Image (tube, rainbow, N blue to C red):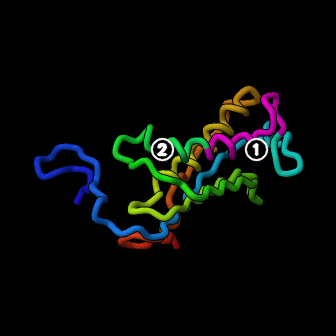
Amino acid sequence: MLTHIDDNKNPTMVDVGEKQITYRQATAVCKVLLPSEILEHLKDGDIKGKKGPVFHTAIIAATMAVKKTSDLIPFCHPLPIENIKIQIKVNIENQVEIQSTVSLHHKTGVEMEALMGAHIAALTIYDMCKAMSHDICITDLQLIHKSGGKSDYSKA
């Protein structure tokens, strides 16, 4: 059943008025595949580009995006986000791994906010590195965990 469709088959926001406030948390991940000509600029855990520190800027952009999710996705409720953690690292396969974890106490979850954070971090990395190469691929955006509310979820 689609929750954003009413009885008349019209799009609608979910009514959370009667739901209980609980602690909600969600984590999303995303990967950015960078060519070697960009990765050669990796030093001390960040890429130093002409526009500044790439990963640090991506963390700031992701944080801003999480807080603006309801402005961009029509049926997302505006939420009083309590915590945002964005982690960016390069794994042993030279892939940039982004993890976005968002939490709050509220009547609705933060899956979309976590996904938005991971995705905007990836897009920011692309934007800041595209002058070095356009051979950049953003991949594997997915929710890996959510807790609180009606059901929990963890991707094995």
Q: Position of residue 102 (x, y in %)?
A: 56, 58
Residue 134: name its quadrant. Answer: top right
Q: Residues within 10 Å of mark 1 (few under 14, many from 20)?
A: some
The stretch in magenta equals 48-63
Q: How many marks?
A: 2
- For residue 95, above or below residue 1: above
Is 147 displayed left or right of 150 in the figure?
right
- For residue 78, above or below residue 52: below
Circle nearer the viewer, 1 or 2: 2
Q: Position of residue 52 (x, y in %)?
A: 81, 33
- Taking the view exactly as shown, the residue that stands out farthest to the left is 8
Is 39 displayed left or right of 67 in the figure?
right
The residue lying at 71 percent from left, 53 percent from top is 88
Type of amino acid at the residue the image marks with label 2: Thr
**Residue 57 colored in magenta in the image:** yes
The residue lying at 47 percent from left, 57 percent from top is 110
Type of amino acid at the residue the image marks with label 1: His
**Residue 81 colored in magenta in the image:** no
Q: Position of residue 8 (x, y in %)?
A: 11, 47
Between 97 and 150, the one nearer to me in the picture: 150
* Mark 1, secondary structure of its residue: helix
Q: Position of residue 42 (x, y in %)?
A: 84, 45
Q: Which residue is mark 2?
A: 69
Q: Can you say which quadrant of the picture contains the N terminus? A: bottom left
Q: Which mark is residue 56?
A: 1
Q: Residues within 10 Å of mark 2 (few under 14, many from 20)?
A: many
- For residue 34, above or below residue 2: above
Residue 74: name its quadrant. Answer: top left
Comes first in the chain, label 1 or label 2: 1
